[in-house]
Image (spheres, rainbow, N blue to C red):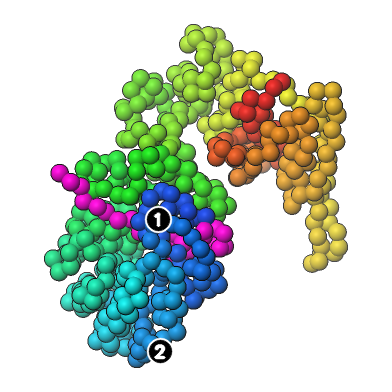
């Protein structure tokens, strides 16, 4: 049986740009549009031309995307004609493949927010759709507050949607703008809408205010909707939009959807999903959500010993899909709770072959337990665990020695106008060469990091692509006995991420250990010679 086509409409660059703390530059937007296009989404909603320079410039930029670049904006203002509305003119002039209008579909909003009549709102929808069609654009209508509007006055909400469809809009998108509608309500209402408008012209735009945006999206698809709007990593205002990073693998891997529907994301592109998700976090300079379904670090992580031995024998026992299909990997957490099978499985993944009765396996497990008792956290720090294991098996070369470091933080100027400067000096011995590096930084850890990585002699070329992507500090125990645990996440030019850990009563000492582990891990991974 031929599968029906479902269309993916990404609004990371428009609705996602409403996220607290997110501020895309033009370069960010172009990079994200390319990521989305590569992944295989059908539409990239890029912004609001005429509303701000970044969005206006995006549309002016030459681009070669397969996805339909969509411009977003309002229908003509009440009481104006389409030819006498500068906002609409900017939208229609934008170099876009499609135009997505947003219009009110809740009578209450028409009256109170728009301060116009229900009929004038309908006329505005019809006129705007017609004007954009006349310009050769594919047209979509986002029916704002559709579900709340439908509950209040179904005939009017439906009339708004129908006005756009009858005028030739390719898609009428039902928006749960406040995000409070529940899946069974979505399924019922979309089902009713689809008796008046064919489902292959109906889209769903869900927000996550009850943490059901993804569930609401699938409820709409079950009821007949054939376009899905959402964002990468669920970015979006308040609690976010429907998360395409979760929706896409569910559509591809769950038979209920995969047997019935086809999307523009190939199996091969699905392998790159975790990478796409992390790449967006990198552009935003945010730490990835470890617990994100499918793509998070912990999505396929198993801790307890008995689960771990089963998972090694037969992964399907504890995994709902194979992690490789979305570009993730199985992770057996090595921690003081873990048994020998976790350690053995982790050693195998790292590529260290050890006989399972080798006494060093028990020694390694004991070492992990002892170190965790004083504050190390190996389940969070895979790279530090790997170094610990490799050191125990004698396979980590002595690349360099740090014989001295000094970090100085000083205030210059007085109080309000004071500037705080940080400098670090590091003495590193590489072979017979003694190198002295000094650097400034925006804080002691940064200065130390910059100084340490400034010149590593013959190893410098191996660490050029190394970046620190996240830095987390936790004070353990509390009181005067407190120790500091630092976790540093790093990445390199290949896109691989790893985490290292340091523990010390002193935050600089803990940071230094984690930095050293990260650099040594990178050297080991790059095959740097001893
Ligand atoms: Zn929205």
- In this rendering, the label closer to the viewer, 2 or 1: 1
Q: What's the residue at 23%, 48% (across, down)? A: 261
Q: Is 109 contained in the magenta span?
A: no
Relative placement, left or right, of 282 versus 75 is right
Residue 354 percent across, percent down from the top left: 52, 12
Total count of labels: 2
Whether label 2 touches label 1, CB < 8 Å: no
Determine the secondary structure under disc 1: loop
Q: Seen in the image, is 216 located left or right of residue 459?
A: left
Residue at the farthest bottom position:
79
Q: Which quadrant of the figure has residue 21?
A: bottom right
Q: Which residue is mark 2?
A: 84
Looking at the figure, which quarter contains the C terminus? top right
Residue 490 locus on image (x, y percent): 61, 39
- Point out residue 512 in the picture as x, y percentages from the top left corner: 72, 36
Q: What whole-number distance in Å separates the C-alpha atoms at marks 2 and 1?
A: 33 Å
Look at the image and tell me whether residue 240 can be seen: no
- For mark 2, give the secondary structure: helix
Q: Nearer the viewer, residue 110 or 24?
A: 24
Q: Which mark is residue 41?
A: none
Residue found at x 48% / y 43%: 275
Going from N to C along the chain, the mark reached first, 2 or 1, is: 1
Question: Dot 2: within a 10 Å radius of its alpha carbon, few (fewer than 14), some, or many (20 or more) residues?
Answer: few
Residue 66 tag number? 1
Bounds of the magenta segment: 1-30
Of residues 129 and 63, which is closer to you in this image? 63
Query: Is residue 165 at least partly visible in the picture?
Result: yes
Q: Quadrant of the N terminus?
A: top left
């Amino acid at each position: 049986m031929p599968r029906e086509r479902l269309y993916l409409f990404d609004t990371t660059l428009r609705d996602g740009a409403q996220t607290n703390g997110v501020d895309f530059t033009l370069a960010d937007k172009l990079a994200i549009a390319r990521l989305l296009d590569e992944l295989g989404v059908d539409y990239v909603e890029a912004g609001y031309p005429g509303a701000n320079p970044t969005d206006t410039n995006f549309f002016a930029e030459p681009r070669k995307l397969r996805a339909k670049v969509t411009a977003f904006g309002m229908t003509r203002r009440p009481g104006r004609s389409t030819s006498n509305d500068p906002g609409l003119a900017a939208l229609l002039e934008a170099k876009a493949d499609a135009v997505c209008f947003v219009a009110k579909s809740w009578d209450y909003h028409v009256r109170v927010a728009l301060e116009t009549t229900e009929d004038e709102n309908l006329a505005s929808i019809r006129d705007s759709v017609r004007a954009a069609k006349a310009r050769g654009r594919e047209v979509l209508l986002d029916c704002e507050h559709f579900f709340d509007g439908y509950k209040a006055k179904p005939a009017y909400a439906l009339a708004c949607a129908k006005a756009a469809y009858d005028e030739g809009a390719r898609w009428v998108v039902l928006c749960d703008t406040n995000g409070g509608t529940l899946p069974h309500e979505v399924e019922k209402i979309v089902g009713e809408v689809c008796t008046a408008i064919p489902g292959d012209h109906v889209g769903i735009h869900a927000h996550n205010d009850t943490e059901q945006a993804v569930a609401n999206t699938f409820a709409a698809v079950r009821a007949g909707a054939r376009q899905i709007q959402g964002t990468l990593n669920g970015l979006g205002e308040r609690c976010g939009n429907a998360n395409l990073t979760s929706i896409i693998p569910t559509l591809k891997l769950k038979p209920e959807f995969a047997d019935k529907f086809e999307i523009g994301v190939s199996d091969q592109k699905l392998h790159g999903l975790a990478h796409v998700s992390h790449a967006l976090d990198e552009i935003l300079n945010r730490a990835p959500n470890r617990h994100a379904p499918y793509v998070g670090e912990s999505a396929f992580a198993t801790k307890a010993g008995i689960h771990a031995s089963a998972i090694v024998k037969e992964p399907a026992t504890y995994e709902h899909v194979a992690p490789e299909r979305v570009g993730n990997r199985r992770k057996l957490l090595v921690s003081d709770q873990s048994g020998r099978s976790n350690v053995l499985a982790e050693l195998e993944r790292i590529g260290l072959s050890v006989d399972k009765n080798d006494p060093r396996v028990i020694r390694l497990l004991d070492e992990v337990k002892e170190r965790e008792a004083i504050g190390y956290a190996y389940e969070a720090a895979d790279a530090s665990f790997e170094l610990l294991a490799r050191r125990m098996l004698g396979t980590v070369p002595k690349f360099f020695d740090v014989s001295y470091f000094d970090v100085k933080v000083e205030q210059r100027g007085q109080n309000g106008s004071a500037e705080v400067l940080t400098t670090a000096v590091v003495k590193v011995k590489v072979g017979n060469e003694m190198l002295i590096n000094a650097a400034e930084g925006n804080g002691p850890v940064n200065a130390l990091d910059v100084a340490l990585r400034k010149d590593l002699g013959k190893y410098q070329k191996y660490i050029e692509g190394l970046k620190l992507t996240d830095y987390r500090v936790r004070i353990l125990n509390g009181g005067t006995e407190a120790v500091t645990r630092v976790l540093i996440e790093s990445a390199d030019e290949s896109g691989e991420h790893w985490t290292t850990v340091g523990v010390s009563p002193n935050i600089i000492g803990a940071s230094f250990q984690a930095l050293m582990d990260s650099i040594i891990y990178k050297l080991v991974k790059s095959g740097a010679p001893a």
